[in-house]
Amino acid sequence: MKVLVLDEWLPFPPDSGKRTRTWNLLRRLARRHEVTLLCYGDARGEAFKALSSAGIRVETVEPLANGCGIGFYGRLFLNLFSRYPYSVAKHTTRRYGDRLRHLLREKPFDLIHCEWTPYARYLAGLGAIPTVIMAHNIESQIWRRRARHNRRTAVRFFFDLQARKMEAFERRAIQRASVTAAVSELDARQIALWGAPCVWLVENGVDTHFFVPARETTGCQELLFLGALDWFPNQDALEYLSGRILPMVQQCYGQAKLLVVGRKPSEALRRRLAGLAGVELVGEVPDVRPYLARAAVVLVPLRIGGGSRIKILEALAMGKAVVSTSVGAEGLAVKDGVHLLFADTPALFAERTIELLASSERRRVLGEAGRKLIEERHDWDHIALCLEAAWKTACLSGDHVEAGTRVQFEVVQAGA
C-alpha cells in the first residue's frame, strides 16, 4: 500500500510514549509498504536521517512556533471564541495544508493515516480516499481530568471548555474516518459508542528483545519515576509523588531514593526537586534500561491521562515491580496483585511501595508475571500486524461510510 501519514513531529528519538509507538510501528510497516510521513520539523537533522534509513519518505514543513509569552496567552483568549479546541487550532496551518494537497496531486495514495486525532482536521475535503485515525487517547478525557485536578476556577472553566470542544471534534472526526484505531479496549468502546463506522484495537507495545529482565541490585531501595517531563500529566504526577507519597515512604525507609528520568525538565522543576531530600533529577538519558534495571520499584502516580502507558509496559518487560494509580494503568490488560499493584490514594500508594521495598520475593513474582504478559500480548511485531490489518480494512471499505450505517467493532489483540 501507498500510505501517507500525517503527524505533528518527527518520531525520533523515541523519547516519549507517542514517539516510541509511532517509530516502532512505522519502521516495521515501511518494510512492506510505501510510507510517506508529513510533519513539522527539520529535514536536515538526525531524526530525518533515521526515518529515511528505515525506508520512510519524510516530508517536513517549517516547525510550529514555541507557545510562550504574551502572544501565547492572546491565542488562548481568542480560542475561547473558536469552534475548535486549542490543540487542534494550534496545529492547523496553511503551510501544512498546502504541502498535503501538493503531495496528493504529486502521486496517488491508497490511504491517509492520521497519527494524532487533532490532525484529522486536515482530512476534510480530501475526497474519497480511505482514512485511518490513530486515537492515542480520548483527548477530551485528558482535558476533563485536568479541569478536575485544578483548584483555580478560571483555569477549570477553560479546561472544561476545551474538553467539550474536543469531544465534539473527536466525534465528528471518527464518524467521518473509514477506520479509527484505539490503544485500549476502554477507548475502543467509547469510540464505538460515538458512532465510529469501524474501530480496531491496536494496543501499545514493547521491543521484547531490547527490554529484557535484569538482575536487581541486592538491598536496593531505589525508586524510579519515568516519563516526559514537559507533559503536564507527568508534571502533576511528579508533584503528587514527591509532595504527598514519598515523605510517607521515607518515614519507613529513610534511605529510599527517588530517581526522576525524562526529557525536558523545566528550570522551575529542577529548582523544586533540588530542595527535596532523597530525590535526584536525572533528566533526559539516551537509554532508560540502566535506570529500570537498578530500580527496586517503578512508580506511576498519574492522575491525568488517557490511552495506555508505554512506560509501564517497558518496566514489565524488564521484570520490574510497579505501583500505579488506576489512571496510570488504565487501558492495559493488567490485574492488581498479579502484574502490578494499584493505589489511588497517597497513603495506599506509599503503603504498597513500602510493601514491595520490604520483599524481594514479592517483587520477583510480580516481575515474572509482568514479563509473561508482555511476551504474550505486547510485542511490537505482533502489534504492527494489527495496524496493518486496520489499514487493509480501511482500503477495502471504499468511500467514507456515513456515521451510523455500519458499526464493525473489531477487537484485534497482538498475536491473535
Image (cartoon, rainbow, N blue to C red):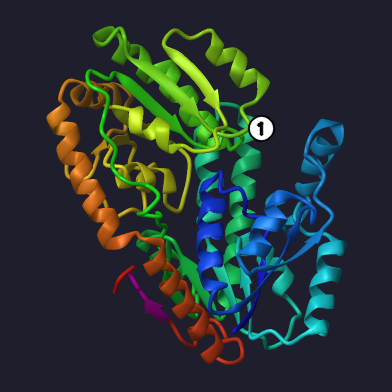
- Residue closest to the far left: 361
Q: x and y percent of residue 38 in the render?
A: 73, 66
Q: x and y percent of residue 335 in the render?
A: 21, 48
Quadrant location of the C terminus in the rendered image: bottom left
Is residue 320 in sight in this rendering? yes
Residue 409 highlighted magenta (yes or no): yes
- Nearest the viewer among 232 and 105 is 105
Residue 39 placement, left or right of 374:
right
Residue 411 highlighted magenta (yes or no): yes
Q: Which image quadrant for residue 383?
A: bottom left
Q: x and y percent of residue 370 in the render?
A: 24, 47
Quadrant location of the N terminus in the rendered image: bottom right
Q: Is residue 229 above or below residue 141?
A: above
Residue 49 placement, left or right of 342:
right
- Nearest the viewer among 207 and 132 is 207
Residue at the image point whose x is 53% and y is 7% from the top: 275
Which residue has dot 1 on it?
Answer: 154
Tell me the amino acid under the disc marked 1: Ala
Residue at the image point whose x is 62% and y is 54% from the top: 11
Q: Is residue 147 above or below residue 404?
A: above
Q: Which residues are magenta?
A: 408-413
Query: Circle 1 — which element?
Result: helix
Q: Which image quadrant for residue 352?
A: top left
